[in-house]
């Protein structure tokens, strides 16, 4: 029996002939049940009356210019829980794995593995009865050289279209930022990560400039994608305005970002556009706390800090006494707060619509953890695919337009009165929505820039 088994190290190179993938590096992981392959632009379709799925793969780690377009029979769609506890729906395909001289059919899930160290994970189901693993070894079946990899994938290089795009943000390791950089490079653009804190500017009527660490002048950018953390909104927007003064195309303007960060002003703008929101109250003084609570329908109610983000500074007050205590506590700290009616029938769920250039490109339902009312993914909420209604799409598009945002995460809640808008985010995260929907949302952001330059 042992003589018939393939001996593998903890990392090996394998191939998938039916998918047209000549070689790909895999993490051999007997601790994982299911095998998984990196895939983007995943889309099911019908072929010869059977269910198939097509997808794109960048088979070489840290090389996103090389793309293989694949299709395979669709076996299943399953919920997979990652080691970090994140749950996502994944398509499952069956195809032939070739490793060394051996070849056999395996099932594997398709998921975006950009944040992982390997494009392929070989799990124990695919190895059972056929493989022995020596975890101390690597590449027992050999590994390709850089030259042979280039030769194998010489026909897979994407042509450059040549825009110079800057991502103005704080953390290059953040999933969303990595994805935007990779999506831009994959579409042939020259991408630059610009750390907000390392930029400084020269205000001059004749020759305005933006400088980067070491005195480098940031010029000749075609476009800037601002991804500004709430804590540095003031400076990030000042830099964005400076790029606008240099006639650089920005994916979201400084004015749009600034007004979206002012929760009170943004709600007023949305109401002026005829968009329904939960009944909301705002007061500067705690003297009329009792009337403020009555104004929004009494307890339970939501108390929100105007400066809060990602569910922070949002409190559910279940009784009138609790509401009074929370409101008065915030007021004693001179904090600006909103009070808002609690939509009980939403049951800890909301809908995030990702709007790009006037279209809803993806939507998910976010569900709060048991005992929690905030559905934010950062707070442990789970994401799942949802079909939004035409009315919800219309609200999301109208809200992004009211805020003058080309890219927006629009949060909607389903109530007995119909859909209500919660808030509009000018730097929406990509991890939850890409993971749940398998859509290349980062790529859609790059396409919006290309559209401005009439490249798409």
Image (cartoon, rainbow, N blue to C red):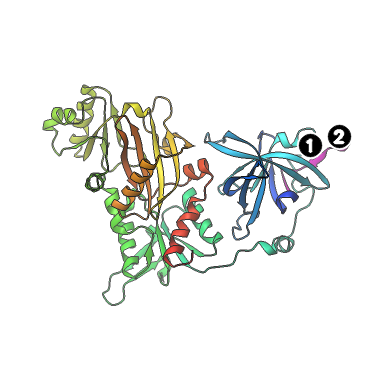
Q: Depth check: give the residue in front, 202 or 281.
A: 281
- Residue at 52 percent across and 50 percent down: it is 440
Magenta includes 289?
A: no
Q: Residue at x 32, y 34 (%)?
A: 418
Read off the residue under disc 2: 2
Q: Position of residue 121 (x, y in %)?
A: 66, 42
**Residue 28 pos. (x, y %):** 70, 41
Write down the region rendered in magenta: 1-14
Mark 2 residue crowding within 10 angstroms, few (<14) / some (14–19) / many (20+): few
Report, in whole angstroms, how far the alpha carbon at label 2 lies from the one at label 1: 8 Å
As rendered, which of 321 and 210 lies closer to the eye?
Answer: 321
The N terminus lies in quadrant = top right
Q: Check the image and report above or below for 336 versus 145.
A: above
x, y percent for residue 373: 36, 29
Of 29 and 391, nearer the camera is 391
Q: Assign a secondary structure to mark 2.
A: helix
The residue indicated by pointer 1 is 132
């Amino acid at each position: 029996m042992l003589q018939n088994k393939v001996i593998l190290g903890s990392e090996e190179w394998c191939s998938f002939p039916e998918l047209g993938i000549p070689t790909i590096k895999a993490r051999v992981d007997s601790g994982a049940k299911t095998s998984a392959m990196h895939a983007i632009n995943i889309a099911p379709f019908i072929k010869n009356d059977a269910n198939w799925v097509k997808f794109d793969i960048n088979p070489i780690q840290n090389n996103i210019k090389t793309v293989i377009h694949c299709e395979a029979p669709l076996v299943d769609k399953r919920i997979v829980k990652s080691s970090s506890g994140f749950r996502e729906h994944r398509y499952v395909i069956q195809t032939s794995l070739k490793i060394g001289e051996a070849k056999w059919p395996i099932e594997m899930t398709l998921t975006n593995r950009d944040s992982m160290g390997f494009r392929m994970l070989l799990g124990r189901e695919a190895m059972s009865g056929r493989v022995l693993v020596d975890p101390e070894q690597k590449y027992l079946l050999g590994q390709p050289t850089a030259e042979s990899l280039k030769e194998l994938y010489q026909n897979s290089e994407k042509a450059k279209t040549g825009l110079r795009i800057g991502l103005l943000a704080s953390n290059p390791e953040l999933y969303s930022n990595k994805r935007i950089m990779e999506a831009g490079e994959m579409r042939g653009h020259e991408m630059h990560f610009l750390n907000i804190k390392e930029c400084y500017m020269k205000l001059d009527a004749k020759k305005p400039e933006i400088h980067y660490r070491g005195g480098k002048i940031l010029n000749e950018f075609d476009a800037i994608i601002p991804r500004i953390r709430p804590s540095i909104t003031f400076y990030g927007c000042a830099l964005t305005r400076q790029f606008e003064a240099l006639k650089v195309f920005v994916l979201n303007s400084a004015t749009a970002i600034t007004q979206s960060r002012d929760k009170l002003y943004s709600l007023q703008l949305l109401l002026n556009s005829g968009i329904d929101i939960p009944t909301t109250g705002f007061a500067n003084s705690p003297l009329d706390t009792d009337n403020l609570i009555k104004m929004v329908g009494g307890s339970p109610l939501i108390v929100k800090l105007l400066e809060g983000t990602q569910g922070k500074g949002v409190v559910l007050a279940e009784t009138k006494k609790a509401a009074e205590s929370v409101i008065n506590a915030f007021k004693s700290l001179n904090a600006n707060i909103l009070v808002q009616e609690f939509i009980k029938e939403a049951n800890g769920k909301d809908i995030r619509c990702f709007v790009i250039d006037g279209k809803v490109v993806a939507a998910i339902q976010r569900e709060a953890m048991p005992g929690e009312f905030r559905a934010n993914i950062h707070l442990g909420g789970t994401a799942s695919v949802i079909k939004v209604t035409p009315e919800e799409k219309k609200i999301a598009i109208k809200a992004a337009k009211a805020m003058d945002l080309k890219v927006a995460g629009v949060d909607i809640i389903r109530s007995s009165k119909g859909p209500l808008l919660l808030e509009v985010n000018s730097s929406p995260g990509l991890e939850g929505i890409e993971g749940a929907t398998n859509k290349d949302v980062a790529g859609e952001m790059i396409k919006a820039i290309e559209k401005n330059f009439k490249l798409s």
